[in-house]
């Protein structure tokens, strides 16, 4: 069974909490699909995705114990 | 790190922690400036300070901003920004500090400090680094109102 | 002046003395920063610091710069620069300090400090004021070498 | 007898001292002519002239007790 850690940041924490673990998701698209079922409010949000601290722009395969982070627009400074 | 840099006379560009818990104190800034008096090849320092504004939004006043970050990714990205900035500008040194946690209105949350022999490099590098920090670092500000509600900050 | 400005809530743009005898201390800069925490409409501060370089010229090292000025004319011109800068940029406040007399290498001789609600105004104003100070204020630097000879500084 | 105060700054102080008084000079051109006779080294120097704290660019009449300042290129900061 493949396990993936999902991290949420910024206003996404208000929707989904800081983190959760998901099982048997093979790609970022699959992960997003499941997350949107679980947290419908996510659909209205803009965010980038980072897999193991690398931001991605297309569907990406996930590996055992990898970390997926959902990053809404930055507002530091 | 500063002691080591002084000892061997070169800047070390290894990843540095930029995060400070809470507000950045004026005395910390003063110490940072004073440390550069031994670097007598410096002719100009450029400093940018971000301060938390008590904005009024829908009749509610911002009391503080609470900062969170994806720290590991932020430090990784900051390291790239640092390397690229040193490659592009003829800098003597560069220091960046960003708050995490709660910073009350009126307090400093960002401190960018660049130094160079001639002022242009320090000024241009400082401006560019501030812009890059705002757009490239995974940091989020949560504006806490006086009535304990909040909204997520949006950078312009 | 700062107390008065705080009391009535508006900036007073009357001619201010910008000259300080000797080097500008880091603690003075820290105090100046700390004073702004009560102005919670400020979002960004831009600071430029000029530091005396120990340049080596014909194998002689600069030990200090001795600054002199035509003070009355400099203050008059600085007042014009101040007024024009406030008219051009949406600033909350602006402070300028320049050394007179001897400033040893490594010490601060110029401190320009601008603040605004949004960073662009403070940054742009600070840059412009530094350039104008260098080109428009009747101030002269005399580079004192370690062997007690001197040469007159030439701005680039 | 008309009296004028002349101030020197920057490297001009090395040539002529910090200040001097001149009598019976009616214009800045006349003043410069006399100064160049007295301090031949001034001829090699670039400077602006201010009369009563206003910089001038053409020959200017002088009045009783006015102050003329010779300002070499600025090098503050």
Image: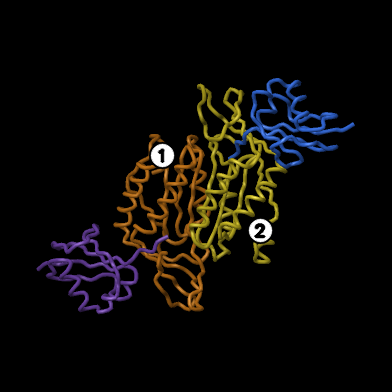
Chain colours: A blue, B yellow, C orange, D purple
Corner quadrant of residue B34: bottom right
Q: Where is residue D18 in the image (x, y as percent from the top left)?
A: 29, 70
**Other residues around mark 1 within 10 Å, as few (<14) / some (14–19) / many (≥20):** some
Q: Is residue B68 above or below residue C100?
A: above
Q: Which mark is residue B2?
A: 2
Q: Is residue D53 above or below residue B146?
A: below
Kindly give the residue lying farthest to the left in the view shown.
D1
Which of discs 1 and 2 lies nearer the camera? The answer is 1
Q: Do the CB atoms of the residues marked 1 and 2 lie less than 8 Å apart?
A: no
Q: Which structural element holds mark 1?
A: loop
Q: Is residue B128 above or below residue D64?
A: above
Q: Mark 2 lies on which chain?
A: B
Q: Which residue is drawn at 80% across and 33% down?
A: A5
Q: Where is residue C151 in the image (x, y as percent from the top left)?
A: 41, 74
**Other residues around mark 2 within 10 Å, as few (<14) / some (14–19) / many (≥20):** few
Image quadrant holding the N terminus of chain A, namely top right
Q: Which mark is residue C24?
A: none
Corner quadrant of residue D67: bottom left
Q: Which mark is residue C90?
A: 1
- Whole-angstrom CA distance, mark 1 to mark 2, is 37 Å
Q: Which structural element holds mark 2?
A: helix
- Could you say which is closer to the camera, residue D51 or residue A13? A13
Q: Could you tell whether B85 is left or right of D68 in the image? A: right
Kindly give the residue lying farthest to the front in the view shown.
A58
Q: In this view, does D44 lie above or below B78?
A: below
Labels 1, 2: one chain: no
């Amino acid at each position: 069974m493949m396990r993936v850690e999902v991290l949420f940041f910024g206003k996404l924490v208000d929707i989904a909490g800081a983190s959760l673990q998901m099982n048997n998701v093979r790609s970022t698209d699959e992960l997003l699909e499941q997350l949107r079922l679980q947290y419908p409010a996510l659909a209205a949000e803009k965010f980038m995705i980072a897999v193991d601290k690398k931001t991605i722009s297309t569907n990406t395969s996930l590996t055992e114990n990898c970390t997926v982070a959902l990053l809404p627009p930055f507002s530091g400074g | 790190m500063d002691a080591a840099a002084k000892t061997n006379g070169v800047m070390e560009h290894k990843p540095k922690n930029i995060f400070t818990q809470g507000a950045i104190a004026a005395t910390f800034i003063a110490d940072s400036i004073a440390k550069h008096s031994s670097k007598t090849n410096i002719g100009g320092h450029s400093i940018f300070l971000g301060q938390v504004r008590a904005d009024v939004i829908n009749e509610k006043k911002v009391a503080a901003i609470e900062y969170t970050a994806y720290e590991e990714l932020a430090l990784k990205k900051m390291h790239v920004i640092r390397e690229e900035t040193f490659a592009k500008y003829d800098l003597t040194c560069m220091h960046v500090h960003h708050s995490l946690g709660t910073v009350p209105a009126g307090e400093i949350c960002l401190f960018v400090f660049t130094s160079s022999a001639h002022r242009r490099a320090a000024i241009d590098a400082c401006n560019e680094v501030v812009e890059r920090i705002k757009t490239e670092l995974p940091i989020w500000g949560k504006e806490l109102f006086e009535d304990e509600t909040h909204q997520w900050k949006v950078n312009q």
